[in-house]
Image: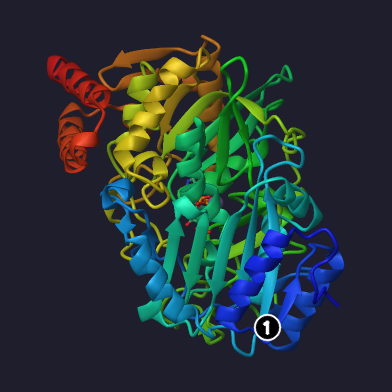
Amino acid sequence: MPDKEPRNGVPQSLIEWVGEVCRLTKPRDVVWCDGSNEELRYLVDGMVADGALIKLNERSYPNCYLHRSDPNDVARSEEATFICTAERDDAGPTNNWMAPGEAHAKLRGLLDGCMAGRTMYVIPYLLGPVGSPYSQAGVELTDSPYVAVNMEIMVKVGAAALERLKAGSFVRGIHSVARLDQGNKYICHFPDEKLIVSLNSNYGGNALLSKKCHSLRLASVMARDEGWLAEHMLIIGVEDPNGTVTYVTGAFPSASGKTNLAMLKPPEYMKGWNVWAVSDDIAWVHLDSEGAFRAINPESGFFAVAPNTSLKTNPRIMEMVRRNTIFTNVAFSSDRTPWWEGMGEHPRKLWDWQGKVWIAGKSPGSAAHPNSRFTTSILQYPSLSPEYGNPNGVPITAMIFGGRRSELLPLVYESFSWEHGVLMGAMLRVETTAAASGEVGVLRNDPMAMKPFCGYHIADYFNHWLSFRSKSGKLPKIFQINPFRLGRDGSFLWPGYSHNLIVLKWIVERCRGKAEAVETPIGYVPTPASLNTEGMNIPEATLNELLHVDKDAWMDELESSRLFFESLGEKLPEALRLELEKLMDRLRSAA
Ligand code: GTP
Ligand code: SPV
Ligand code: MN
């Protein structure tokens, strides 16, 4: 049985706040989570008993469960996400804004009695390695046992968190499933109060408040004020055959390949190389005393996309999710083996993500939801970096921007300078995915893959990035990659997944002053020979197409970036405007 009372040593400030929220939301009882295995067992068993989780096949998927969310609650809801700052301009043109007074009034009405008849879980959590100067504490109060069990996998719940929050301030999160009323869905952030309130959703980033809400939206504001970066980035260590490990971060928008790159299994033809995962989604990047970039992963688990994960595309993920995993919105077969599109063979008959019978070739739509996901502890990942728990983080040599782009962007290229790299990130324009509600495949500006996650004015954020020029003597090199180019027949030109290690190798070698490149107007593009594609059998013409710089198409792209920058108003840094002009000039003189 979990604790119904706070244990000795829980700070008074937390006890008082929990009391305050209880008086407002009126739960039937309160559970103080300690993050123990027994507690997780108890919560999971309770959810199986009441049908919120379905136990999967114990032989093939031991201790694995399926959760089906409400069909209207299957992705992040950007339209319901608000930054609540005193001035509208502090949230900037890429965020929804609400005045704090108005937001509090509205939320108070909705919170009143919203947990009646339910249990409220108090979840103290630590983000980042134990003992790290960069770690942070938070507490989420939620009436969702689904959120509680996911949080116990995603972050460090319990003693380590209480220890940290005794020592200082902490982020407060209030979450209620309420009545899943779509018209009253709000995910509100109050940076000045370090407070998050999320109502009427039970899905992923809307409800697991440690993830995008704390680690990115609120943390990005703290990072601006304190001189560091909170980014939507994976962190990996790329090991070469000599055993040297180079640490790299990568910012790609939602459902655009972060988890798969972080968990890449080297192809047969790259003996001696390996990729070690530190993070698959979020990086907190601080400067050390020498001015070098050091990155930690605030999270302790994965909440990652299921579709297209298979033994072929990513055997390491497949191995990892075969035990102790919670699946959300996948399909399963009659023996309760999970299935999703792109996994491979399946029986003719399945139960789809809503629990309806699904017959291959007959039933409409997909069996698994396109944004179906799995939640697994990072400690279960077979190629977890030994540096994952290093309180000082890992030293970053290169930063990559990327995204889903069926045309234009080459497979990989390198920026000329820090400022040019910041421009690359700021210009990121990519196709939307099923990770957020709304249309899929629409091109939109998603600077640094942070459009939905930057908690303040995006032009100030660009300025913050530029400011590292003078703060650091060891700036990482900046690259852009795009494994999603399509050919005329609509199929991917680049096989991606494990083969992306060829691209990582080029990046690592560029950082060491090796690997050849041609100087083009947009940056350094690999020579075909420098990519070492011998092992993978790619036609020469395809490789040339993947590396081609279409100057006219780039001029159109720059025009669209110019308009986007203009829409940001006066705060746009002059240095960025200049970089864009320089890029235009280079393209013009090359044409
Ligand atoms: P979030 O967790 O939403 O932030 O997504 P993510 O950026 O971690 O993306 P993820 O690695 O989960 O990939 C999203 C989808 O793209 C999955 O269906 C992957 O199988 C697919 N994908 C990932 N990498 C590649 C690649 O190199 N090529 C192709 N064609 N598809 C890929
Ligand atoms: C994303 O959308 O970028 C995700 C999934 O990683 S969620 O946790 O829902 O934000
Ligand atoms: Mn991911």
Image quadrant of residue 350? bottom right
- In screen coordinates, is 90 left or right of 7? left
Q: In this view, does 550 lie above or below 563?
A: above
Q: Quadrant of residue 332?
A: bottom right
Residue drawn at (79%, 62%), measured in percent from left and top? 35
The answer as to whether callout 1 falls within 8 Å of ligand 1 is no
Q: Going 82% across and 70% down the picture, which residue do you hit?
A: 39
Instruction: Work out whether residue 144 can be spotted.
Output: yes
Q: Nearer the viewer, residue 98 or 562?
A: 98
Nearest to the observer: residue 128 or residue 244: 128
Q: Which residue is drawn at 63% across and 90% down?
A: 117
In the rendered image, residue 394, in percent from the top left (x then y), is placed at 66, 28
Q: What element carries label 1?
A: loop
Q: Quadrant of the C terminus?
A: top left
Residue placed under numbered mark 1 in the picture: 334
The answer to whether residue 255 shows anywhere in this view is no
Find residue 490 and report its horizontal and vertical position in percent: 32, 51
Callout 1 amino acid: Ser
Query: Residue 92, how many percent across, how many down?
Result: 29, 47
**x, y (%) of residue 62?**
80, 68
Q: In this view, does 93 lie above or below 411?
A: below
